[in-house]
Amino acid sequence: MASLYLHIPFCEKKCIYCDFYSIENSSPMEEFLSALHVEIDAYAEFGKQESFETIFFGGGTPSLLSPQQLESILSHLHHTYSIESDAEITVETNPGTVTREKLTAYRTLGVNRLSIGIQSFHEDELRFLSRIHDSAQALDCIRSAREAGFDNLSIDLIYALPDQTKERWEANLQKAVALSPNHISAYGLIVEDNTPLSRMVRSRLVSPKPPDEEAEFYEMTMSYLDAHGFEHYEVSNYAKPGFRSRHNYNYWKHENYLSFGPSAHSFRREAGESRRWFNIANLSHYCSALQEGRLPLLTEERLSLSQLRTERILLGLRSDGLDVKRLDSELPSSTTSRVQMIHDLVEAGSATFDGNVLRLTQKGYLICDEICARLM
Amino acid sequence: MNQIRNFCIIAHIDHGKSTIADRLLERTGTITAREMKFNQVLDDMDLEQERGITIKLHAIQMLYKAMDGQEYTLNLIDTPGHVDFSYEVSRSLAACEGALLVVDASQGVEAQTISNLYLAIDAGLEIIPVINKIDLPSAMIDTVKHQLKDLIGCNDDEIIPASAKANIGIDEILEAVVRRIPPPKGDVHEPLRALVFDSVFDIYRGSIVYLRVVDGTLREGEKVKFFHNGKVYEAEEVGTLGLKKVRTGVLTAGNVGYLIAGIRDVHDTKVGDTITTATNSAAEPLPGYKDVKPMVFSGVYPTQAEDFEDLRTAIEKLQLNDSALIFEPESSTALGFGFRCGFLGLLHMEIVQERLEREYNQNIINTVPNVEYRVTKTNGEVVLVDNPSYMPGIGEIEKVEEPFIKAQIIVPTEYLGNIMKLCMDRRGIYKNTTYLDPTRADIQYEMPLSEIIFDFYDKLKSTSRGYASFDYDILDFRESDLVKLDILLNGESVDAFSTIVHRDKAHEWGKRLCVKLRKLIPRQMFEVAIQAAIGNKVVARETISAMRKNVLAKCYGGDISRKRKLLEKQKEGKKRMKQVGRVEIPQEAFLAVLSMDEE
């Protein structure tokens, strides 16, 4: 099972915490789109080798695309690649960029899932995060999406903002759940390098939450969503039964994905070799490369067996379990026995183990990275 | 022989030994100012220069045309400047007839100077007192003169005021060396007797022996014998020591020089040994030979188990140049395979550790140093214990004895109280106080050696604003109420943390160590209990709560490589830790005891 990803590198305004590549000026949109079409053609051979079950428009702000622009991309993809008839097609949506009409048009074009960046229902938190919408627009967006015929909606939330109280975070969770989304992604705020937020932290304008306090927010999130019928299937992702993100789940299951657009990352396992390649994170270089008939690559990695193993461990433990038997048969290693380690984890209530699959519990998710490093 | 003068310089660190030596070399034309470069000639190891101390002995020969019109051969023999090497100092002194006693005009006499001075007086050396740095604004020439007169009973006019930096007093020093230091005694016609005062290992030539010929003649081509082990070698090369070796083929009584004899093992060329000819040997060796015994022991382990053989090679190589270092393999449940090393003292230990890391690129973990204990068991058997893990069980011990030292501390009187408190805390037994002048006292204590190997020197300096100076001599073994204190992590004893302490201090020590370890051991996946115990009795406990959170929130397609790299880095960090049971211990923790705070 394989996935397609398209990176739409434009935002009306950049959020202070975001380190994904995008620019605030969307006037080169047409130039970008023609480059994107060239790139889609450039990988056409892969389209003959396997079929794709998900398409994800991420960014940046892909909901800045007009229905016409989206249609031209989608039809090009359908024309060039073998897309399954029940494919999951997601557009990341900023509530400040859409109307009911636009969402209706998206739905008509075959988009069947929206991932809506709500982040918070508190106006001051939205301003702090420098979001372009308010909470009323977020509610409007959900309503419009439903009216447009979407029945698979995901909401993004961010917690552990500086000075955020647990009560305020719980209020966000309550409001989110009250909207009956099918899926919630809840992320602890990460201070990424080279973001306005990291500069604010460096100049001591804000101080990030200490890890122990963030842990309490995370625990609260896990129990709250569990109590409301959401399956916790990845460190930061929760879904109603049957509504896991098939696209992201493919990433975590080490499936192939092919990506387009500046800064996009692709992964492909071929016989005897696995590769990751990354596009350059610069729109004009991206465009000029494709115009000149070159691929806009920044780097390419060929993964060793042990690198693949490490990825398998981290992806498995971060999501819904690591199949230890399969790991050892597919990616064998001479690493010393993990039996004691697994036993200790289970005894401490950090994991469950059925003899094949090691799956983290809430307690285990909290220290997932530590467990991964110990099991590597 | 009448034209030879053998002498050394006794001085405290930084009082100007090296600069005075440099001036003497310059004035006698042994070396030009241009050759002097930036560094002083006598210190040729990086470490020595950085620490401002001379670790290994060397000698240099100068030719000096004196005012009496005659040309003299002056052999300047360097001496190590630290208490750890006092036996080497005594052998260097034994190779001389005189000594320059150099005292900094702004600092006055220090403990180390006094103990070396006593060694020199005991060896019957002619002492030439020199006050250096007289041009400093803070010079207290009269006070220092007073101290010197009290100390050696000399007259005012015997003291040479000097400034090596400003080139004052250098001619006076050279003339005094020629006039006041007696020429060597000795009989050229007697069988050969030469005193070994140092040796250095050269990978091409083997051991290079530095020696002073006392009687007879040493010739190339002759068979020579070492008294202490009776081994015989052929003298391949003999010469004197200029800036470089000067091959002369012959060294006669009274002179100082070197011998190369294809000796592959430095342990055959021990400092203090006597060399004679294999035929027509001298009947008796020169007096004073002593087998130097290490006083401080510590485990040296490779950070990564697979580097054990590399570490062995490195220690073996280092030992070729350092006959005082001893080692043997040992194993620890916490640290795996390593070596128990014996050192002359703490400084010697630090030097060895640094050389292993810097010159031999070894990543090592050192365990907390300890002294050697003499344990009499209930069955009457006496065992020497140089590793706390090997201490017999409490029930098997009749008595434990530990080495005591005589400590000499010189300190301005205003800090006397602080120093006496420190010595009392360290189980010192007060002996007496002498006043060098109204502002400076010389205090003597008898103390357990084990009490000075942990941060005593640092404490001494910090409680006296750096003014106290310290020296010690080993006295004897004395019975003490000593117990082995173990550290348990989650109930499992970590042998590398075991120490032997006085019973009265065990609780306090255990508590401090637990607190320190709680700070140094990072939080883990599981709660970690740190306990200090004597036998089965727990005397202190601390808990490290389990790690609460270590997970990065997001991991999209583009984050996977980044995430993998972060984990690989985290894994590398873990490799540098030692795992005991389920607990990962960082290397710093093994040295925790060395830097224990007093409070």
Image (cartoon, coloured by chain):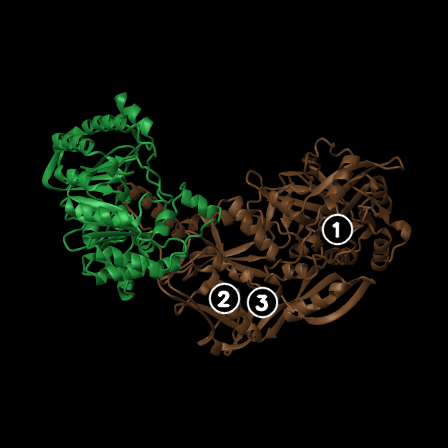
Q: Chain of mark 2?
A: B
Q: CA distance from mark 1 to mark 3?
A: 36 Å
- The local crowd at label 3, few if under 14, some if 14 to 19, many if 20 or more residues have their Cα within 10 Å, is few
Do the residues indicated by labels 2 and 1 lie within the same chain of the protein?
yes
Tell me the residue at 34%/38% (across/down): A13
Check the residue under mark 3 and report the chain it is in. B
For residue B598, side relative to residue B23 (left or right): left
The residue under the point 60% across, 47% down is B232
Q: Is residue B290 left or right of residue A40?
A: right
Q: Are marks 2 and 3 in contact (CB under 8 Å)?
A: no
* Front residue of this view, candidates B239 and B511: B511
**Which residue does the image show at 67% across and 45% down from the upper left?**
B210
Q: Is residue B147 visible?
A: yes
What's the chain of the residue with tag 1?
B
Q: Residues within 10 Å of mark 2 (few under 14, many from 20)?
A: some
Which element is circle 3 on? loop
Find disc 3 in the rendering and name its residue. B599
Q: Alpha-carbon distance for marks 2 and 1?
A: 42 Å
Secondary structure under tag 2 reads helix
Question: Residue beneath label 1, please?
Answer: B11
Quadrant assignment, res A306: top left
Which of discs 1 and 3 lies nearer the camera? The answer is 3
The CA distance from mark 2 to mark 3 is 11 Å
Visual hue assigned to chain B: brown
| Apparent colour of chain A | green
Q: How many marks?
A: 3
Residue B515, numbered circle: 2
Q: Amino acid at mark 2?
A: Val
Q: Position of residue A296 (x, y in %)?
A: 29, 28
